[in-house]
Every structure is written in C-alpha cells, then in structure tokens.
Image (cartoon, grey):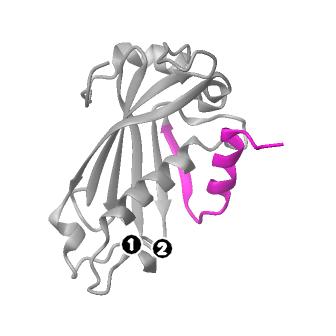
Amino acid sequence: MPASRGLLFSRIADQLSAAKKTLSPIHCCVSVPGGFPYEAYNGSAWIKPWSILRMVETCRATVFNVDAEGNSFLDSRKNYQDLFVFIAATKNQVSQDMYNHSIKKSPLQIEVELVQVGTSSFNLQTSISCEHISQPLCINNVQSVFVSNKTRKPTLVDGKILKTDRETSSTGESLFSL
C-alpha cells in the first residue's frame, strides 16, 4: 500500500538534522547547523544553483512535517487529505554574499512564511540566512495552487489558517494570476 503524501514529508523531515520552530501559524524557522552539504559545492567551491533550490525544498518539507502535538504548517495535514499542491511558479533572488568565499555558509537559519493568499493559490517566501550576515543569502518565492484530488482542477481552500490570512497577509505579491 503506497504511503500518503503527508507520511512521505514526515519521513524526509525525520532524516534531516534540521530543527523547526513555529513562530506563528504562517511563519516557521528551520535551523540547519551544518549549513550546505559538501555536494552543494562545485569544484571551485561555488554553491550550485540546484543546491539552493534543494535546500529550499528540504526546509519546506521540514515545516510541513506534523509535529509531536499533531499540528502542521498551514494545516497541511488536513488539506493534503483532499488536495494536491502544484508548484506553478518560482522566483529566486540570490545575494552576492552567497558566492563570497570569505563568508562561511553555516549555520543556516531558513524562514518559511506565507506572504500571499489567493482564492486557490498561495505564495510562500523562503529566506536563507546566516547568523553573521545582515541580509539573506537567498530569497525564494513559490506560488502554489491547490488542486482537488477529485476534480483535478484548482479549488478554493477551506483551511482555517488560509481563510484568516487571506484578509491579513499583505507582504507578498502573486507571481502569476489564475
């Protein structure tokens, strides 16, 4: 019997040495003490672009993991029962500090925040930072669409957190329109 998507997120997050801290229902922070792994760098000691995206995805898997109390970021535990999340667009802003050899890329602090909610889509902003640098090394925005498992079409979201924050979240902008 295949595992559910939520269980797979849990298995991935369990394999990481990262620690999640929930700052609010729409804002989490992930600490990655080791920073970028060895294979994230090329032979010239530059971080590969795909490695940045992998770190973003790894931290997203960590924040969506269900915690010991049964809570999950953006109520994903409930939403993933009836919905599939499709990433429709992404945008990266990489600081020059990411490629500065004199700056050690660990430990990393990665913040994931809901910054925009539409009728069937939402925008998460992921910021990768180091404690000793004032600006983020990278800011990634991902626009995702909720798709009904039954109809296979974009759908409205019933999640209590997303409904509330549709009115209050104003720091982000849509990467595209449906």
The residue shown at (43%, 59%) is 55
| Magenta stretch holds residue 77 | no
Counting from the top left corner in percent of width and height, residue 20 is at 55, 51
Q: Residue furthest right?
A: 1
The residue shown at (63%, 56%) is 12
Give the labeled residue for mark 2.
34
The residue shown at (58%, 15%) is 151
Indicate the secondary structure of the residue bearing disc 1.
Answer: loop
Quarter of the C terminus within the rendering: top left
Instruction: Count every numbered label the image shows and give the total.
Output: 2
The residue shown at (45%, 32%) is 26
Amino acid beneath label 1: Ser
Q: Which numbered disc, 1 or 2, marks the residue that appears first in the sequence?
A: 2
Quarter of the N terminus within the rendering: top right
66, 86: nearer the viewer: 86
Tag on residue 168? none
As drawn, 17 above or below 77: below
Amino acid beneath label 2: Gly
| Magenta stretch holds residue 7 | yes
Counting from the top left corner in percent of width and height, residue 131 is at 33, 64
Graded by Cα atoms within 10 Å as few (under 14), some (14 to 19) or many (20 or more), the crowding at tag 1 reads: some
Graded by Cα atoms within 10 Å as few (under 14), some (14 to 19) or many (20 or more), the crowding at tag 2 reads: few
As drawn, 6 above or below 175: below
Q: Residue furthest front?
A: 152
Circles 1 and 2, Cβ within 8 Å, touching? The answer is: yes
Tag on residue 106? 1
Indicate the secondary structure of the residue bearing disc 2.
Answer: loop
Q: Which residues are magenta?
A: 1-23
